[in-house]
Image: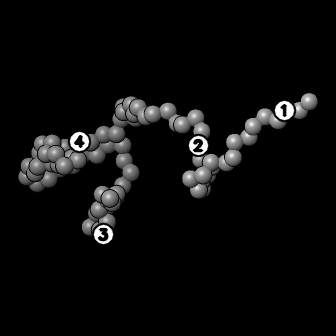
Amino acid sequence: MGSGELRTSRVKRWQVRKVRLTTPKPTMFHGDGEILGSTPVEIEVVPRALQVLAPAPPLMSLPVGGTGKLPPRQLPRITE
């Protein structure tokens, strides 16, 4: 599955916090595959507006560049 990024010289990219899109006549605006309304439209990034819940990391993880094999388990030595 690809990233969904459109790679063409016709697409320009800018980093902004807020943008207003206008067109000479009202044009339908799509977001994430859904029709959201018509232009003009304002889009704003709101910091910390999204809360993401994810499972806790595993108690034991594979070493970096792991081979899928865990290191041998170390057992305590019993000495007399």
Which is in the foreground here, disc 1 or disc 2?
1
Give, as a three-letter code, the residue at label 4: Glu
**Residue appearing at x 67%, y 48% in the figure:** 71
Which is in the foreground here, disc 4 or disc 3?
3
Give, as a three-letter code, the residue at label 2: Ser
Give coordinates of residue 56: x percent, y percent: 50, 33
Give, as a three-letter code, the residue at label 3: Ser
Sooner in the amino-acid sequence: mark 4 or mark 1: 4
Q: CA distance from mark 4 to mark 2?
A: 44 Å
Residue under numbered circle 2: 61
Tag 4 secondary structure: strand
Q: CA distance from mark 2 to mark 3?
A: 42 Å
Sooner in the amino-acid sequence: mark 1 or mark 3: 3
Q: CA distance from mark 4 to mark 1?
A: 70 Å
Residue under numbered circle 1: 78
Kindly indicate whether the residue at mark 2 contacts the one at mark 4 (C-beta within 8 angstroms): no
Give coordinates of residue 77: x percent, y percent: 82, 35
